[in-house]
Image (cartoon, rainbow, N blue to C red):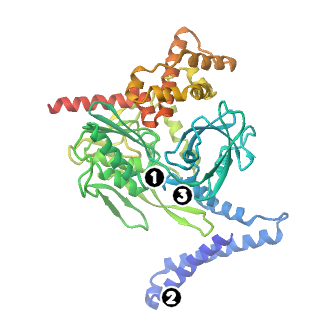
């Protein structure tokens, strides 16, 4: 409770001090402030008395730190759904993806049958330097077993991560090696990339996928644009699907790559925070080429700022489904112990004045968090016609005067329905029961070196590689043992096609990276196909 008391005491003292600086006549003219100060003093006294009563009288011993956390969370639960409190550990986890780096051993992994399996080592990272290989199983960390003991993934991560320069001893099981191998890995800073895919999806058309908006996102985007330009990119698909947002400055930096200097990108307004405009910084690397932005119901916050700015300025098309609608601005207030509250201080507005934030009721976070599920139940994700906008929510874009809509989230120019029947029930269950990934990994362990030697070029791999029947058969065999079977012959054929595609994409990811994975998985993605259609149509119009 001490932190709350100190915070409220500082607020109270600040208020009293401000009052004392006013001339006597001004103080008499400001009774609302006096009443507010008296109320703050009363609330502080009440909170102090409650803490003293609990400490003096409660039947059991008390954990004051937990009570403090609970008290703060209780206060914030009555406010908007994005004003929140996080403990020191939670704060660190929240900040890591946005700071573009963490400190650890540098591996990508999956957990298979309660064992950590290395998928890839980070290039020039700590694990690669000591000789850890894809396919290795990490079973010991500092002589403590992490395999076969049903340890939580968060606990495994805690043991592998640590300050730069510290040493962790790993016990590795490697195929065809009878004994456990020991490696001393010196932890280091490991980069986290927010641009996780960058490739040419068609001649002249590049695709860049951004997963969040972090410290280095603009830098990564510029590098991706330049890389694709060297490969002949004239048009771009910017994939913001399932992008939950991140830093406002990163959103401004990304949008600035597509819009002319001083173009308004977003503005904020709040009760105690002054109106502020954010404008394009100039020097953008993709100011002229045709542009399509992909969004869905999980695109939020910074992703909505970027897509809203591009739509309002008629810079490109927005394709997908209505975005999440997270348009509240939070200011972080850190505490000395590393914990933090994030206080909502203002709203985001697109350049034409649309409020990005969807409606909510204070204190009803559960209902707010179920909004996407309700959209699914109401049919919005499948049918564009199920969405109705009042005339008051209609706005006009800045250059072409097209009608766009406010009321929460960014409504795309071209709606792509969610296809809930795209994947067979059998395929979904094979995925859920880990049949596909596990059998793929088993095959990769045996043939990784052979595949990497044979396919040094992704284009050759994509054109020639066919997933062996033995892999598909092993996946179906494991599914049968778990009572997962296709309903009929047609279902079996379709499921095998879907499984083969995923396994091929996973194989490409293991040999190269996520760009190659998405190059395979996106060849029949409905949003991507619509984007390609629009870019092709625009190209014909310009001829």
Q: Nearer the viewer, mark 2 or mark 1?
A: 1
Q: Is residue 123 left or right of residue 236?
A: right
> Under tag 3, what secondary structure?
loop
Tell me the tag on residue 246. 1
> Upstream in the sequence, badge 3 or badge 2?
2
Q: Which residue extends farthest top? A: 489
In terms of sequence position, does the residue under pointer 3 or pointer 1 come before the other? 3
Tags 3 and 2 in contact by the CB under 8 Å rule? Answer: no
**Numbered badge on residue 224:** none
The quarter of the rendered structure image containing the N terminus is bottom right
Q: Residue most toward the right?
A: 59
Residue 133 shows up from this direction: yes
Circle 1 crowding by C-alpha within 10 Å: few under 14, some 14–19, many from 20: many
Which part of the image, by quadrant, shows the C terminus? top left
Depth order, front residue of 187/363 = 187
The residue to which callout 3 is attached is 83
Q: Which type of secondary structure does the marked residue at label 1 adopt? A: loop
Side of 167 relative to 83 (left or right): right
Task: Tell me residue 279's x, y (percent).
Answer: 29, 58
Q: Which residue is mark 2?
A: 20
Task: Give how far across and how far down residue 135 sits, in percent.
Answer: 60, 34
Answer left or right for 532 relative to 503. Answer: left
- SS class of the residue under badge 2? helix
């Amino acid at each position: 409770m001490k932190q709350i008391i100190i915070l409220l005491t500082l607020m109270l003292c600040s208020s009293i001090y401000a009052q004392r600086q006013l001339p006597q006549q001004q103080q008499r003219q400001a009774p609302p402030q006096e009443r507010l100060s008296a109320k703050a003093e009363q609330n502080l006294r009440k909170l102090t008395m409650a803490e003293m009563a609990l400490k003096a009288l409660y039947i059991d011993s008390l954990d004051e730190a937990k009570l403090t956390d609970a008290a703060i969370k209780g206060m914030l639960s009555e406010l908007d759904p994005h004003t929140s409190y996080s403990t020191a550990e939670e704060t660190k986890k929240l900040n890591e993806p946005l700071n573009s780096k963490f400190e650890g051993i540098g591996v990508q992994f999956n957990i298979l049958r309660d064992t950590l399996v290395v998928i890839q080592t980070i290039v020039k990272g700590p694990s690669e330097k000591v000789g850890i290989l894809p396919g290795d199983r990490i079973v010991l960390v500092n002589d403590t077993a992490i395999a076969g003991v049903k340890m939580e993934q968060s606990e495994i991560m805690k043991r592998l991560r640590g300050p730069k320069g510290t040493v962790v001893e790993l016990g590795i099981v490697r195929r065809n090696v009878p004994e456990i191998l020991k490696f001393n890995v010196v932890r280091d800073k490991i980069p986290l990339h927010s641009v996780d895919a960058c490739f040419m999806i068609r001649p002249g058309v590049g695709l860049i996928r951004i997963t969040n908006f972090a410290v280095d996102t603009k830098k990564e985007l510029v590098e991706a644009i330049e890389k694709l330009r060297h490969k002949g990119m004239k048009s771009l698909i910017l994939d913001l699907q399932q992008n939950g947002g991140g830093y406002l400055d990163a959103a401004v930096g990304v949008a600035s790559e597509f819009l002319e200097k001083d173009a308004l990108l977003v503005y904020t307004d709040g009760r105690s925070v002054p109106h502020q405009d954010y404008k394009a910084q100039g020097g953008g690397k993709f100011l002229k080429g045709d542009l399509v932005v992909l969004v869905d119901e999980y695109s939020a916050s910074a992703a909505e700022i970027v897509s809203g700015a591009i739509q309002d300025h008629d810079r490109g098309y927005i394709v997908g489904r209505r975005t999440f609608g997270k348009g509240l601005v939070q200011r972080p207030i850190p505490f000395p112990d590393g914990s933090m509250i994030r206080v909502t201080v203002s709203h985001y507005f697109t350049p034409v004045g649309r409020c990005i934030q969807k409606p909510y009721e204070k204190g009803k976070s559960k209902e707010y968090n179920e909004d996407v599920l309700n959209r699914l139940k109401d049919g919005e994700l499948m049918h564009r016609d199920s969405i109705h906008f009042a005339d008051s929510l209609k706005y006009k874009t800045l250059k072409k005067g097209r009608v766009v809509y406010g009321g929460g989230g960014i409504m795309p120019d071209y709606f792509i329905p969610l296809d809930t029947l795209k994947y067979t029930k059998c395929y979904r269950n094979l995925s859920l029961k880990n049949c596909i990934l596990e059998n793929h990994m088993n095959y990769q362990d045996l043939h990784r070196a052979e595949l990497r030697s044979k396919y040094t070029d992704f284009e050759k791999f994509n054109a020639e590689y066919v997933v062996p029947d033995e892999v598909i058969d092993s996946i179906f065999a494991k599914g049968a043992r778990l009572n997962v079977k296709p309903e009929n012959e047609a279902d079996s054929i379709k499921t095998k096609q879907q499984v083969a595609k995923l396994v091929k994409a996973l194989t490409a990811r293991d040999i190269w990276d996520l760009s190659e994975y998405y190059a395979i998985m996106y060849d029949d993605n409905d949003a991507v196909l619509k984007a390609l259609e629009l870019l092709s149509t625009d190209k014909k119009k310009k001829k």
